[in-house]
Amino acid sequence: MSTSHQPAAPAHAGPDPLNIATESGGDPGESAAPARKRKRKRRGDRDDGTPKVGPTGRPVREIPEPPPLERHGPARVMAMCNQKGGVGKTTSTINLGAALAEYGRRVLLVDFDPQGALSVGLGIQPHELDQTVYNVIMERSVDIVDVVRSTSVANVDLLPSNIDLSAAEVQLVAEVGREHTLLRVLRPVMDHYDYVLVDCQPSLGLLTVNALTAADGVIIPLECEFFSLRGVALLIDTIEKVRERLNPKLDITGILATMFDPRTLHSKEVMARVVEAFGETVFDTVINRTVRFPETTVAGEPITRWAPKSAGAVAYRTLAREVIRR
Ligand SMILES: Nc1ncnc2c1ncn2[C@@H]1O[C@H](COP(=O)(O)OP(=O)(O)O)[C@@H](O)[C@H]1O
Ligand SMILES: [Mg+2]
């Protein structure tokens, strides 16, 4: 019944130092003038002195710039994962990667989707590639170092992909240690990088399980649309199974709300439900819907270079700071 409210009420009125300070106007030892001043200040607190609230409904928390690294590696592997397509996995992989690199981190982006959108987004034509991640995971004679390529962004390398990778899902089934294939091929370069971001394909098949097995953390981009919430339970279930059976260190680093439209009630309602369901797992950083992202795909560059001062670029830098801190 209402008994649960009772402990809360005195807790607010009592030990809260702010309340004690502001409610002390009746203190006989004080003149009326300071009391009025305090009152005005209190009103000011509410209007503009209260902490600014971000799109998640939580107070905005400033994250300081990460300190420069003294040495590099071993890499933290992050799987960018959601079995729904078009939620911002690839966009987030490119732009988070580029933003981490701006903070002096060495980044390897792994295109683990046969669509090759990550490769295209970095200005590479997938059908022109001789060797891709497919050859690295399926052919023992192919060295990852020979297939990784630098990009136009300093400190960002790419392990590209193309349609060949679609065969891997079937071929891997017959392999010994099939779920650990990506982990095994990444090992030789782990010490060179600080972050490896794996852009997963929109499925929970064997390739995605490989990414989760190789990963320290999962970032789940989630479109701020009602139906986007539907598949998340299944995704989290898969992550938990991989943690139990294949990779005990696997953790959900964060849920990233994407395609947020601050003008619509719908976006805000979805956001509120996501925060209600996942709490602190949701990043403070929220990516707004903007046409600048499709533009960057055409340009073959991350937004941090295409439009370095845009809100989108700023948002991915903030995300990078959150990821470094988590
Ligand atoms: N915040 C955003 N606002 C508007 N369009 C976006 C945003 N993020 C991604 N897009 C666009 O939406 C499409 C799908 O994004 P993408 O990152 O490829 O998703 P996924 O990899 O999950 O399929 C792309 O055309 C991309 O340019
Ligand atoms: Mg994609």
Image (cartoon, rainbow, N blue to C red):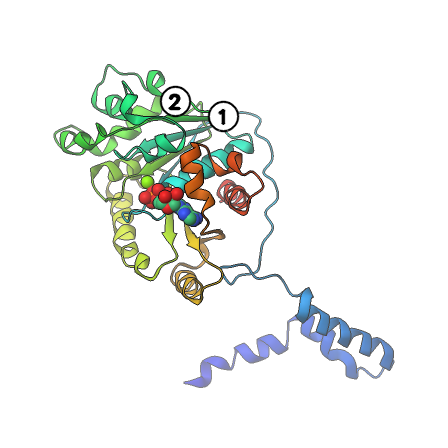
Considering only vertical position in the picture, is 167 above or below 326? Answer: above
Rendered location of residue 137, percent (x, y): 24, 25
What amino acid does circle 1 point to? Answer: Asn
Q: Is residue 8 left or right of residue 282?
A: right
Secondary element at image label 2:
helix
Q: Residues under labels 1 and 2: Cα distance?
A: 14 Å
Rendered location of residue 257, percent (x, y): 42, 53
Considering only vertical position in the picture, is 242 above or below 146? Answer: below
Q: Residue at x 78, y 84 (%)?
A: 26
Mark 1 or 2, closer to the camera: 1
Q: Is residue 221 left or right of residue 321?
A: left
Q: Nearer the viewer, residue 313 or 22?
A: 313
Q: Callout 2: few (<14), some (14-19), or many (20+) C-alpha neighbours within 10 Å?
A: some
What amino acid does circle 2 point to? Answer: Val
Rendered location of residue 221, percent (x, y): 38, 48
**Circle count:** 2
* Residue 220 visible at all: yes
Do callouts 1 and 2 mark residues in contact (Cβ within 8 Å)? no
Q: Residue at x 30, y 32 (%)?
A: 116
Question: Which quadrant does ligand 2 occupy?
Answer: top left
Q: Is mark 1 within 8 Å of ligand 1?
A: no
Rendered location of residue 8, percent (x, y): 53, 77
Q: Quadrant of residue 178?
A: top left
Q: Quadrant of residue 204?
A: top left
Q: Which residue is mark 1?
A: 155
Q: Is residue 71 left or right of residue 13?
A: left
Q: Quadrant of the N terminus?
A: bottom left
Task: Name which of mark 1 and mark 2 comes first in the sequence.
Answer: 1
Q: Residue at x 46, y 32 (%)?
A: 301
Q: Residue at x 37, y 53 (%)?
A: 223
Q: Which residue is mark 2?
A: 189
